[in-house]
Image (cartoon, rainbow, N blue to C red):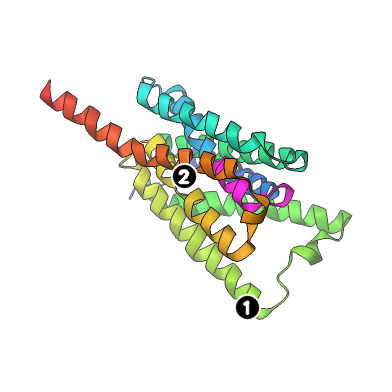
Amino acid sequence: MKPIPIEKIKRFGSIGMVVGLHWICFYASIKLANASLALICLAMTSLFTSFFEPMILKTKFQKIEIFLGICIVPAMALIVSDLSSDYFVGVLVGILSAMLAAYFSVLNKKYITDHDPYIITFIELGSAALMMSVIVLILWSTTSYLTVMMPHSTMDWVYMMILSLVCTTLSFILALKGLKHISAFGYNLIFNLEPLYGVLLAILILHEHKDLSPRFFVGAFVIISTVLAYPFFINRSKKKLTLT
Protein backbone atom coordinates (compact mmCIF):
# COMPACT_ATOMS: atom_id res chain seq x y z
CA MET A 1 0.00 0.00 0.00
CA LYS A 2 1.44 3.35 -1.03
CA PRO A 3 1.62 6.08 1.62
CA ILE A 4 -0.41 9.16 0.72
CA PRO A 5 1.66 12.35 0.29
CA ILE A 6 0.62 15.46 2.22
CA GLU A 7 -0.60 17.24 -0.92
CA LYS A 8 -2.94 14.34 -1.70
CA ILE A 9 -4.21 14.27 1.88
CA LYS A 10 -5.10 17.94 1.43
CA ARG A 11 -6.76 17.10 -1.91
CA PHE A 12 -8.90 14.32 -0.42
CA GLY A 13 -9.67 16.59 2.53
CA SER A 14 -10.99 19.26 0.18
CA ILE A 15 -13.09 16.63 -1.61
CA GLY A 16 -14.45 15.66 1.81
CA MET A 17 -15.62 19.24 2.31
CA VAL A 18 -17.56 18.97 -0.95
CA VAL A 19 -19.10 15.76 0.42
CA GLY A 20 -20.10 17.68 3.56
CA LEU A 21 -21.67 20.48 1.52
CA HIS A 22 -23.58 17.84 -0.46
CA TRP A 23 -24.99 16.41 2.78
CA ILE A 24 -25.96 19.85 4.05
CA CYS A 25 -27.78 20.69 0.82
CA PHE A 26 -29.49 17.30 0.68
CA TYR A 27 -30.89 17.48 4.20
CA ALA A 28 -31.75 21.16 3.75
CA SER A 29 -33.74 20.14 0.66
CA ILE A 30 -35.67 17.63 2.78
CA LYS A 31 -36.38 20.35 5.32
CA LEU A 32 -37.38 22.95 2.71
CA ALA A 33 -39.44 20.54 0.57
CA ASN A 34 -39.82 16.88 1.58
CA ALA A 35 -37.91 13.59 1.47
CA SER A 36 -39.43 12.41 -1.82
CA LEU A 37 -38.55 15.59 -3.72
CA ALA A 38 -35.03 15.69 -2.25
CA LEU A 39 -34.43 12.12 -3.41
CA ILE A 40 -35.80 12.75 -6.90
CA CYS A 41 -33.55 15.82 -7.21
CA LEU A 42 -30.58 13.52 -6.63
CA ALA A 43 -31.40 11.88 -9.98
CA MET A 44 -29.99 15.03 -11.60
CA THR A 45 -26.57 13.74 -10.49
CA SER A 46 -26.36 11.70 -13.69
CA LEU A 47 -26.88 14.74 -15.91
CA PHE A 48 -24.16 16.72 -14.12
CA THR A 49 -21.82 13.71 -14.20
CA SER A 50 -22.23 13.29 -17.97
CA PHE A 51 -20.60 16.73 -18.33
CA PHE A 52 -18.23 16.79 -15.33
CA GLU A 53 -16.61 13.41 -16.06
CA PRO A 54 -15.23 14.16 -19.56
CA MET A 55 -14.28 17.71 -18.51
CA ILE A 56 -12.35 16.65 -15.39
CA LEU A 57 -10.99 13.30 -16.59
CA LYS A 58 -10.17 14.64 -20.07
CA THR A 59 -12.13 11.88 -21.82
CA LYS A 60 -14.53 11.95 -24.76
CA PHE A 61 -18.10 13.02 -24.20
CA GLN A 62 -20.29 9.91 -24.37
CA LYS A 63 -23.41 10.56 -26.43
CA ILE A 64 -25.42 7.85 -24.68
CA GLU A 65 -24.57 9.26 -21.23
CA ILE A 66 -25.54 12.79 -22.21
CA PHE A 67 -28.73 11.47 -23.85
CA LEU A 68 -29.76 9.52 -20.73
CA GLY A 69 -28.82 12.45 -18.51
CA ILE A 70 -30.93 14.84 -20.60
CA CYS A 71 -33.87 12.39 -20.47
CA ILE A 72 -34.07 13.12 -16.75
CA VAL A 73 -34.62 16.88 -17.34
CA PRO A 74 -38.22 16.71 -18.69
CA ALA A 75 -39.06 14.23 -15.93
CA MET A 76 -37.82 16.74 -13.36
CA ALA A 77 -39.77 19.51 -15.13
CA LEU A 78 -42.90 17.36 -14.93
CA ILE A 79 -42.38 16.87 -11.22
CA VAL A 80 -41.68 20.53 -10.47
CA SER A 81 -44.45 21.94 -12.70
CA ASP A 82 -47.19 20.88 -10.33
CA LEU A 83 -45.48 21.80 -7.08
CA SER A 84 -46.52 24.41 -4.57
CA SER A 85 -44.28 27.49 -4.70
CA ASP A 86 -43.30 26.68 -1.12
CA TYR A 87 -41.22 23.76 -2.43
CA PHE A 88 -39.25 25.56 -5.14
CA VAL A 89 -36.35 26.60 -2.90
CA GLY A 90 -36.11 23.04 -1.60
CA VAL A 91 -35.94 21.70 -5.17
CA LEU A 92 -33.20 24.18 -6.11
CA VAL A 93 -31.17 23.22 -3.05
CA GLY A 94 -31.75 19.55 -3.92
CA ILE A 95 -30.42 20.11 -7.46
CA LEU A 96 -27.36 21.85 -5.96
CA SER A 97 -26.90 18.76 -3.79
CA ALA A 98 -26.95 16.60 -6.94
CA MET A 99 -24.37 18.82 -8.63
CA LEU A 100 -22.04 18.52 -5.62
CA ALA A 101 -22.53 14.73 -5.57
CA ALA A 102 -21.55 14.53 -9.24
CA TYR A 103 -18.52 16.73 -8.66
CA PHE A 104 -17.03 14.79 -5.75
CA SER A 105 -17.70 11.39 -7.34
CA VAL A 106 -15.82 12.41 -10.50
CA LEU A 107 -12.93 13.78 -8.44
CA ASN A 108 -12.78 10.50 -6.51
CA LYS A 109 -12.77 8.58 -9.80
CA LYS A 110 -9.78 10.66 -10.90
CA TYR A 111 -7.66 10.30 -7.77
CA ILE A 112 -8.63 6.95 -6.22
CA THR A 113 -6.60 4.66 -8.50
CA ASP A 114 -3.43 4.24 -6.40
CA HIS A 115 -4.86 4.53 -2.90
CA ASP A 116 -6.77 2.44 -0.38
CA PRO A 117 -10.53 3.23 -0.26
CA TYR A 118 -10.47 2.80 3.54
CA ILE A 119 -7.86 5.54 3.97
CA ILE A 120 -9.60 7.83 1.50
CA THR A 121 -12.91 7.29 3.31
CA PHE A 122 -11.25 8.18 6.63
CA ILE A 123 -9.76 11.38 5.21
CA GLU A 124 -12.84 12.54 3.30
CA LEU A 125 -15.48 11.71 5.92
CA GLY A 126 -13.20 13.06 8.65
CA SER A 127 -12.83 16.31 6.71
CA ALA A 128 -16.61 16.49 6.15
CA ALA A 129 -17.26 15.83 9.85
CA LEU A 130 -14.76 18.49 10.90
CA MET A 131 -16.31 21.09 8.60
CA MET A 132 -19.83 20.28 9.76
CA SER A 133 -18.73 20.36 13.41
CA VAL A 134 -17.50 23.91 12.91
CA ILE A 135 -20.86 24.83 11.39
CA VAL A 136 -22.68 23.21 14.33
CA LEU A 137 -20.52 25.16 16.81
CA ILE A 138 -21.35 28.39 14.97
CA LEU A 139 -25.05 27.54 15.14
CA TRP A 140 -24.69 26.69 18.83
CA SER A 141 -23.05 30.03 19.58
CA THR A 142 -25.60 32.07 17.64
CA THR A 143 -28.89 30.13 17.86
CA SER A 144 -30.63 27.39 19.79
CA TYR A 145 -30.51 24.91 16.87
CA LEU A 146 -27.99 22.61 18.55
CA THR A 147 -30.45 21.36 21.17
CA VAL A 148 -32.99 20.66 18.42
CA MET A 149 -30.44 18.75 16.33
CA MET A 150 -29.12 16.52 19.13
CA PRO A 151 -30.68 13.04 19.60
CA HIS A 152 -33.08 13.03 22.55
CA SER A 153 -33.16 9.34 23.48
CA THR A 154 -30.94 6.25 23.63
CA MET A 155 -32.63 4.74 20.56
CA ASP A 156 -32.01 7.96 18.63
CA TRP A 157 -28.28 7.53 19.33
CA VAL A 158 -28.50 3.88 18.20
CA TYR A 159 -30.18 4.94 14.95
CA MET A 160 -27.52 7.63 14.47
CA MET A 161 -24.75 5.04 14.87
CA ILE A 162 -26.42 2.72 12.35
CA LEU A 163 -26.87 5.57 9.86
CA SER A 164 -23.30 6.81 10.29
CA LEU A 165 -21.44 3.47 10.32
CA VAL A 166 -23.55 1.28 8.01
CA CYS A 167 -25.52 3.61 5.75
CA THR A 168 -22.75 6.20 5.36
CA THR A 169 -19.24 4.88 6.11
CA LEU A 170 -19.68 1.35 4.77
CA SER A 171 -21.56 2.51 1.68
CA PHE A 172 -18.89 5.17 1.03
CA ILE A 173 -16.14 2.54 1.12
CA LEU A 174 -18.06 0.25 -1.23
CA ALA A 175 -18.72 3.20 -3.57
CA LEU A 176 -15.01 4.03 -3.75
CA LYS A 177 -14.19 0.40 -4.49
CA GLY A 178 -16.83 0.40 -7.22
CA LEU A 179 -15.37 3.55 -8.79
CA LYS A 180 -12.19 1.62 -9.53
CA HIS A 181 -14.13 -0.59 -11.94
CA ILE A 182 -16.91 1.55 -13.44
CA SER A 183 -17.26 5.11 -14.68
CA ALA A 184 -18.46 7.89 -12.41
CA PHE A 185 -21.55 8.20 -14.63
CA GLY A 186 -22.35 4.49 -14.27
CA TYR A 187 -21.83 4.72 -10.52
CA ASN A 188 -24.15 7.70 -10.19
CA LEU A 189 -26.84 6.04 -12.32
CA ILE A 190 -26.76 3.07 -9.95
CA PHE A 191 -26.78 5.49 -7.04
CA ASN A 192 -29.90 7.05 -8.54
CA LEU A 193 -31.83 3.92 -7.62
CA GLU A 194 -31.93 5.54 -4.18
CA PRO A 195 -34.98 7.63 -5.17
CA LEU A 196 -36.87 4.41 -5.92
CA TYR A 197 -36.63 2.85 -2.49
CA GLY A 198 -36.38 6.26 -0.81
CA VAL A 199 -39.71 7.44 -2.21
CA LEU A 200 -41.30 4.10 -1.33
CA LEU A 201 -40.07 4.41 2.26
CA ALA A 202 -41.23 8.04 2.40
CA ILE A 203 -44.70 6.88 1.33
CA LEU A 204 -44.76 4.01 3.84
CA ILE A 205 -43.25 5.84 6.81
CA LEU A 206 -43.97 9.54 6.24
CA HIS A 207 -47.17 9.16 4.14
CA GLU A 208 -45.85 11.76 1.69
CA HIS A 209 -47.94 10.44 -1.20
CA LYS A 210 -50.74 12.64 0.13
CA ASP A 211 -48.68 15.70 -0.84
CA LEU A 212 -47.64 14.39 -4.27
CA SER A 213 -49.53 14.62 -7.55
CA PRO A 214 -49.77 11.99 -10.33
CA ARG A 215 -47.23 14.07 -12.28
CA PHE A 216 -44.66 13.35 -9.59
CA PHE A 217 -45.07 9.60 -10.01
CA VAL A 218 -44.96 9.82 -13.83
CA GLY A 219 -41.74 11.82 -13.61
CA ALA A 220 -40.30 9.42 -11.04
CA PHE A 221 -41.15 6.48 -13.33
CA VAL A 222 -39.29 8.13 -16.24
CA ILE A 223 -36.23 8.74 -14.06
CA ILE A 224 -36.11 5.19 -12.73
CA SER A 225 -36.64 3.79 -16.25
CA THR A 226 -33.69 5.87 -17.46
CA VAL A 227 -31.52 4.42 -14.69
CA LEU A 228 -32.50 0.87 -15.59
CA ALA A 229 -31.97 1.51 -19.32
CA TYR A 230 -28.29 2.43 -18.89
CA PRO A 231 -26.89 -1.14 -18.57
CA PHE A 232 -28.92 -2.20 -21.61
CA PHE A 233 -27.44 0.54 -23.82
CA ILE A 234 -23.91 -0.05 -22.50
CA ASN A 235 -24.06 -3.80 -23.19
CA ARG A 236 -25.47 -3.13 -26.64
CA SER A 237 -22.66 -0.71 -27.51
CA LYS A 238 -20.05 -3.19 -26.22
CA LYS A 239 -21.50 -5.90 -28.45
CA LYS A 240 -21.29 -3.61 -31.49
CA LEU A 241 -17.64 -2.84 -30.73
CA THR A 242 -16.91 -6.56 -30.38
CA LEU A 243 -18.56 -7.35 -33.74
CA THR A 244 -16.61 -4.62 -35.50
Mark 1 neighbour density, 10 Å: few (under 14) some (14–19) many (20 or more): few
In the rendered image, residue 75, in percent from the top left (x then y), is placed at 53, 34
Give the residue displayed 49% in from the left and 30% down from the top: 47
User: Residue most toward the left?
Assistant: 243
Mark 2 neighbour density, 10 Å: few (under 14) some (14–19) many (20 or more): many
Helix, strand or loop at label 2? It is loop
Tell me the residue that label 2 is attached to.
192
Residue 14 visible from this viewpoint: no
The amino acid type found where label 1 is placed reads: Met
In the shown orientation, is residue 34 left or right of residue 185? right
Of pointers 1 and 2, the one earlier in the residue sequence? 1
Give the residue displayed 50% in from the left and 61% down from the top: 167
Q: Which residues are magenta?
A: 30-42
How many numbered callouts? 2
Residue 159, placed above or below residue 128: below
In the rendered image, residue 71, in percent from the top left (x then y), is placed at 46, 29
Q: In the rendered image, which quarter is residue 88 located in?
A: top right
In the rendered image, residue 159, in percent from the top left (x then y), is placed at 58, 71
Residue 171 visible from this viewpoint: yes
